[in-house]
Amino acid sequence: MQTAIDLHSDAPHRGPAVATASLRAENVHKTLGTHPVLRGVSLAAYPHEVISVLGASGSGKSTLLRCLNLLEVPDSGDIWFRNEKLDIRPAAGRDGARIGDARQARRVRASLGMVFQSFNLWPHKTALENVMEGPVHVRGLARRTAVECAKHYLRKVGLIERRDHYPRHLSGGQQQRVAIARALAMEPEVLLFDEPTSALDPELTGEVLRTIRSLAEEGRTMILVTHELSFAREVSSRVAFMQGGRIEEEGPPEEVLSRPASAGLRRFLDPAC
Amino acid sequence: MNIALITESIATLLGGVVLTLELTILSLLIGFVLSVPLAFLRASRSPWLSWPVLAYTYVFRGTPLLVQLFLIYYGLGQLAVVRESVLWLLFRDPFYCALLAFSLNSAAYTIEVFRGGIQSVPPGLVEAAQAIGLSPTKIRLRIVFPLAFRTVLPSYANEVVGMIKASSLASTVTLLEITGLARKLVSETFAPYEVFVAAGAIYLALTFLASRLFNLIELHLAGVPPDKARRPWLLKLRQAR
Amino acid sequence: MGGFQEQFLRGLETTVLVAAISGAFGMLVGLAGAAAKLSRFRALRMIADAYTTIVRGVPELLVILLVYFGGTTALTALVGSYVEVSALWAGVFSLTVVFGAYATEIFRGAIQAIPRGQTEAALSIGLAPWQTWLLVILPQMARIALPALCNLWISLLKDTSLISIVGLSDIMRIAVVGAGSMRDPLTFYLAASALYLMLTSVSLLTFRLVERRLLAPVH
């Protein structure tokens, strides 16, 4: 197990007292079909950091996020959760890799809250039941406690009044906030957001971004894949720009976004030029 | 046609309704229990898991139920292993032979119905369940199957109606359910029209009730807006359990 | 199997014959039924509704028993001396009625799945209503209805076994007779199963091929 002080070059802005990243990808490669989506990506999120991953569509940023909680299994490279390396093994009889230890994967996933682009609320459960599912069936809370827990987080995202509504009776923005409450109810170490506002009508993105901002202000560790540039600049402690399956630039938002070093990022920031 | 005779026949034939329902409901229950795990195997991407189940559903859906019933009723006794085991206590009895044939047959159809439903569940909903760390079994039972069942409810309703009708084949192995009683009554009264029409009326009532029941379930699951019905009765039932 | 091979072959012929005739007539009944269901006339719609609701809600076996024994009684009363309806024609009639009821629903659904604009487009270029049906509606309907018709045909093949109960010498009947006389039910019913499985497999493959042919030019 890794206990020594982390000297990895990926963490230029961690606080001096913090030794271990909450979540880290190391030299991750992933090919989907015949297309190499990730070509050696390393990224670490230290406690209380908010990292925004930017990039054009197809740059591999969503795949990177999905590799972090093993929804996609990296072909090579390592994923570390705190100082625990996730068990990834070569798949038998085909290319790629598979999850080696399903229990570990489940346990780690339970500590990583994931919010999807298309919400993925379970349509046969009410808002409250969606949020309760994890607390009851993964965390093993008593039903009564789980109800309280779920209500707490629904209140937090401002949807306590809608707890008995089914997803189809909620607007997109409300569904996404329920999905955020569902992730929060697991009381995760790290929150992963996969383009949380991309499926929303422009007038609905505000409510979701406000919710995410308030979480950032609480000091939660978050990795956010997004297209919302100004939002990323505002809430992030660090941004990473991806292109062609690699991280091109990484650093504090004011630096990276104001003085882009690479031509790729310059084009991304100002498509007109 | 003699109306009085029809009503008289209906009264007699109602005596067979219990056996018809018994066979139908038990077969559906056994078929359901068998088909849920097998449907997941059938929907699996691994051919080692999927093909054996496909072979089962293919054979049972590709041959007449009557042949399956006779194979079990007349054929099982030919096997020494069966005749000399405790199983013989069961399969000597036409009721259990019919029950076995109907259950296996119903399971075969139900597996394919459920498989379709399972494969229609959007992958994102499964990923959301994986992302909170839900175990594979719980994902199947709490997320995938309930959603699959909802999608295929109309097809499953057809399967239920089909089973009510198929239970009439029990009359060919001496069981006196509705059709069996009807055939007996015809041989006594020589009034085939009246008796069979009466039997038909009873079946029609049963199948109508079954489809109605499923329509109601469908409406409930389709969801009345929550302000109008905060807790559908089905959910209440589920939570009471 | 003591000379039963040849009998099985004849049984196979009978099974296929009965299914083919019932299927052909049943298609016609289904087309008429669908037309009636979509007709402007309320009486026609009600008759067609009653027909499909009743037939689909009653066991196929019961329909066969009713037609066979009821038909015999009716004919006997008509002629004045005992006349027995042939199992074959009673079976064909029953299964036509059953097939027709399901086919009605399939065709109705398929016709309704064709966008309304298709008819309008056909009429707008001056096709007569019958031409619209023949050239525009029917070909599209056939494509949509094909998978369901395949299933219905396979049900029909299997349902023919029920006619053996009133004495038709089909595959099933030969198996019953053979099983009894040779005291070997396992062999005979397994042989029957194999024959039915062969018929349903050939049907499935044929429909696959037809489907591929029909669907190919669309995309």
Image (cartoon, rainbow, N blue to C red):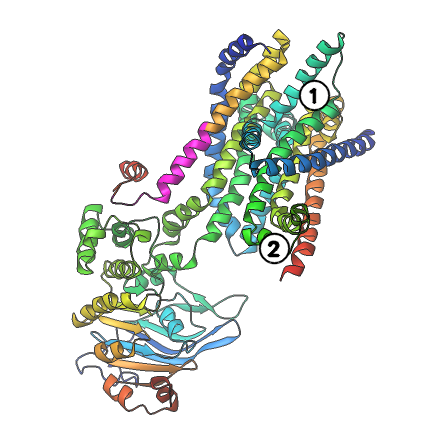
Which element carries disc 1, helix, strand or loop? helix
Report x, y in % for residue A169. Answer: 30, 52
In front of the other: label 1 or label 2? 2
- Residue type at numbered disc 2: Ser
Comparing C130 with C1, the one in front is C130
Comparing B55 with A2, the one in front is B55
- Residue position for label 1: C166
- Whether residue B175 is visible to the viewer of this picture, yes or no, is no
Report x, y in % for residue C88. Answer: 74, 25
- Residue position for label 2: C124
Which chain's residue wears label 1? C
- Residue type at numbered disc 1: Val
Quick check: is B9 in the magenta stretch?
Answer: no
In the image, the segment drawn in magenta is B209-227
Tell me the quarter of the picture where residue A250 sits.
bottom left
Q: Look at the image and tell me in which quarter the N terminus of chain B lies.
A: top right
Q: Residue at x 23, y 78 (%)?
A: A236
Report x, y in % for residue B41. Answer: 50, 49
Q: Residue at x 58, y 46 (%)?
A: C110
- A21 relative to B48, above or below: below
